[in-house]
Amino acid sequence: MTLQVISVAEIRGLLAQLMEQGRVVAPHKRPGDRQWAFEDLTDPADAVLQYTTTIIPAKKYAFPPKETLLRYELGQAPSVTAVVDSEPLVLFGVHTCDLYGLTALDTAFADHFADANYLEKRAKMRIIGIECVPDEWCFCASMGTATIDSGYELFLTPLPDEEHYIVEVGSDAGDEMLKGIASREATAGEVSYLKTHLNRKITQERHLDSDYTALPLLFTGFAESPVWEKWAEKCYGCGTCNLTCPTCFCWDVLDEMGLALTTGERRREWDGCMLEGFARVATGENFRENRTERLRHRFFRKYAYLFTRYGKPYCCGCGRCVRQCLVKIDPVGVINELIAAHGKGGALIG
Ligand code: SF4
Ligand code: SF4
Ligand code: SF4
């Protein structure tokens, strides 16, 4: 299909149409400077089209912060019932970094034991992506996620007048969505603007001093670096960086029994490797007791272990972790400092 152009009024019309069919979530402005959040849409006019990032990524709709996994009853005839909640959902306004984040989670949740709770929610999700407004913390270009060509039904890029958007169709469901929506074919000038816009996006000021594909090899030389301790000295161990990250997927499992001790439920809740209790085991030992070990582990996991396992990094360069971190522990700053201290050869020379 050729690229189409639609107006902002038509985008709001499309949202109204989708809301008639079911649940739609979209970015909303939140109190405070540059704060946005994905929330249920009740009025198409509330959907924010141009924003930097939401506080919590869209992963919360496929992997909720708290989720019941099963319910059980004890007694004469004990029973256990799996709980898998899912419903059709349109996710509007997802940026390229967050689209990548979802595909990274798709891989992890399908690995080894397919996670029905996550995968069923994802299967019922339709996504309308939108081009973003980068800020000083974005480094998606360094992670190869500034552009993406799959994982969405429609993808919208604003034209300079900001009253019209170029629409790329990514699936048959995207084609369906556009039926009944007034659009016209993009002109040659508009297509060429799209290319210029993307070229501008990939020349970001904040960038890694290395090609991201070299990171797993580079990290082999970083394990004993004093750079970890230097950054970890500032860290509060609050876990915000994990909990706001679109590619983090760790959780804890808890059982909650009723007062009569005959019924209960098992649920999972987000967890994060920067939290002190994350690696504490039942006997009381903690195998990543200090913040230096935890910070190093987090970085190794994102840029080396999972990269090696799945063939892609578990960081999309969205900058949420540093944006929300009180002491601004910044992946680009940490990695560039490691490279400066130990070189690009993957060997410790410091
Ligand atoms: S958000 Fe910052 S202070 Fe909190 S755990 Fe992460 S790096 Fe440490
Ligand atoms: S590590 Fe930070 S920059 Fe990378 S995906 Fe997570 S929140 Fe975004
Ligand atoms: S990280 Fe990239 S895609 Fe994500 S909001 Fe920033 S500039 Fe946009």
Image: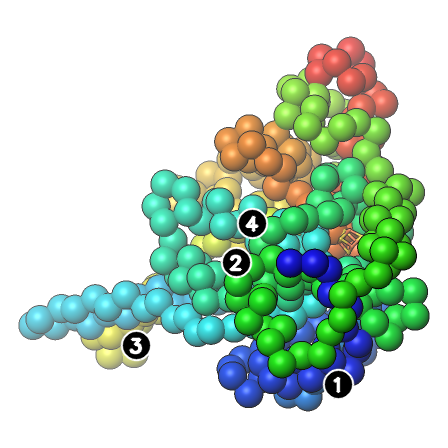
Q: Amino acid at mark 1?
A: Ala
Q: Identify which residue is drawn at 41% across, 47% down.
A: 110
Q: CA distance from mark 3 to mark 2?
A: 22 Å
Asked if the residue at tag 4 contacts the one at tag 3, i.e. Cβ–Cβ closer than 8 Å, the answer is: no
Give SS at disc 2.
strand
- x then y, percent, for residue 158: 83, 65
Query: The N terminus is located in which quarter?
Result: bottom right
Depicted 198 relative to depicted 266: above or below: above
User: In the visual, does 169 lie left or right of 81?
Assistant: right
Q: Which mark is residue 258?
A: 3
Q: Which mark is residue 270?
A: 2
Q: CA distance from mark 2 to mark 4?
A: 19 Å
Quarter of the rendering containing residue 152: bottom right
Point out the tag, 3 or 2, that comes first from the N-terminus. Answer: 3
Pointer 4: what residue?
A: 103
User: In the visual, does 246 lie left or right of 197?
Assistant: left
Point out the tag, 3 or 1, that comes first from the N-terminus. Answer: 1
